Amino acid sequence: MRNPGDFVLVQDPLGFLNMLRRMKVWGEELPDAVAILTTPEPLEAEAEVEEKVLVYWLHMFGVRAYRIKLSSLLSA
């Protein structure tokens, strides 16, 4: 197998978290990974809480998480 560190995986956050959980259960080595979370503006309070929980779990698996806020400005 090629070096997993040479790849970028684009996946929904919960799918990524589930993959990490399965790897842990199967005794697989967890990757040295970075997660980039994209969030649209405005961020609702419920979504913000969910994101904080997700970041906590990613941290528990050794994944560094960064957030990028996206917004679009329309000009007439």
Image (spheres, rainbow, N blue to C red):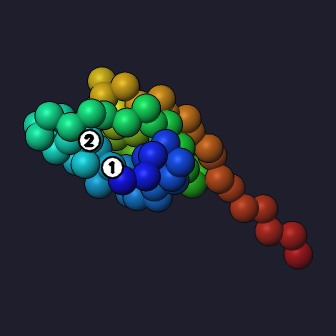
42 left or right of 74? left
Contact (CB < 8 A) between labels 1 and 2?
yes
Which residue matches tag 2? 20
Residue 57 located left or right of residue 8: left
Q: Position of residue 55 (x, y in %)?
A: 39, 32
For mark 1, give the secondary structure: helix
Amino acid type assigned to the residue bearing label 1 in the image: Phe
> Is residue 30 at least partly visible in the picture?
yes
Question: Which residue position is annotated with label 1?
Answer: 16
**Could you tell me which secondary element the residue under label 2 belongs to?**
helix
Write the residue at 37% across / 25% down.
62
Which residue is located at x 72 percent, y 61 percent? 72
Relative image position of residue 67 (x, y in whole percent): 56, 39
Q: Position of residue 6 (x, y in %)?
A: 53, 48
Q: Position of residue 69 (x, y in %)?
A: 63, 46
Q: Is residue 49 visible?
A: no
Q: Is residue 40 above or below residue 26?
A: below
Say if 19 sits above or below 28 in the image. below
